[in-house]
Amino acid sequence: MENTILAYAFNSENKLVHIDSVKNGLECGCICPGCKEKLVAKNDGKVREHHFAHVSGNDCGTGYQTIRHIWGKEILFENRTMPIAINGKKGFIKAEAIGMEVKLTDLNIVPDVFAKVVQPCNYLGIQLPVEIPLIAEILVTHKVDDEKAEIIRKAGVPAVEIDLSKSMATTKEELIKDISNQDNWNIINDKVGARFMAGVQSYVNGLINAYRSSCGYSGYTTYSRPRRTHHKNYRKHR
């Protein structure tokens, strides 16, 4: 349990708001992100730091855990940046497309953040772009379970779990440092599935077909040899 003063809460629209952006007291209409209990906004004082307090007087201590989980997803989504690990090498990469809690119907899982990126692939000495899916999971209280991890590995989707369980960040800016620290990254899968690499051949075929079209090439034409015929009076005039 944390003793950190709670400065954020969910408002009536289920949006995360700061203590100084709401009305004082119960008029704030906010609940704890962790336990969902009603909160009292204490933001009119000049001595104590402004904060939310539980109506019951008992602080659940889980509010910031939920907040960090939300912030972790938002940081990746808003910056369109994903952690990536392939063959043991880790880093960040810009996403072509990205979404939070998108259900992957073919795998029947809902990752915290899912994205598609374009990576160069060496094909016969030529660098070609390949679209690869990526998964990022944010660990605050619950690790990715073995079943989900196995599904991800079998699908050949590179995936990283960012461990924020020891983070004490109370702002997004502070949390960015914890997300960027690769010592907090657990690799779920760093192998790209063969089915995604098959897209390289499709890409090459597309380039070949485009080149042929530009040259007016429509494929090989098969010519049949004319059948030889004899004049009906051939033997007679021989």
Image (tube, rainbow, N blue to C red):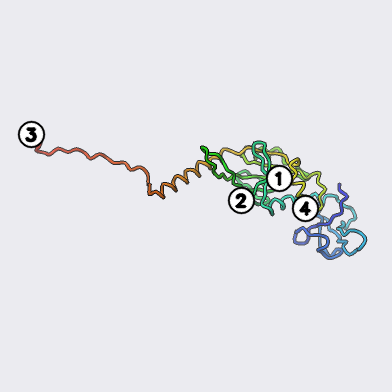
Q: Residue at x 10, y 36 (%)?
A: 234
Mark nearest the camera among 3 and 4 is: 4
Q: Secondary structure at mark 2?
A: loop
Residue assigned mark 4: 173
Q: Position of residue 79 (x, y in %)?
A: 68, 53
Q: Position of residue 178 (x, y in %)?
A: 77, 46
Q: Is residue 6 left or right of residue 123?
A: right
How would you rate the neighbour count of disc 3 (Cα within 10 Å): few for under 14, some for 14-19, many for 20 or more? few
Q: Residue at x 80, y 53 (%)?
A: 171
Q: Amino acid at mark 1?
A: Glu
Mark nearest the camera among 1 and 3 is: 3
Q: Position of residue 16 (x, y in %)?
A: 77, 58
| Earlier sequence position, callout 1 versus callout 2 | 2
Q: Kindly give the residue lying farthest to the left in the view shown.
A: 237
Mark nearest the camera among 4 and 1 is: 4
Q: Is residue 227 left or right of residue 199?
A: left
Q: Amino acid at mark 3?
A: Arg
- Residue at mark 1 to residue at mark 2: CA–CA distance: 18 Å
Q: Amino acid at mark 2?
A: Glu
Residue assigned mark 1: 137
Residue assigned mark 2: 96
Q: Which label number is shown at residue 238?
A: 3
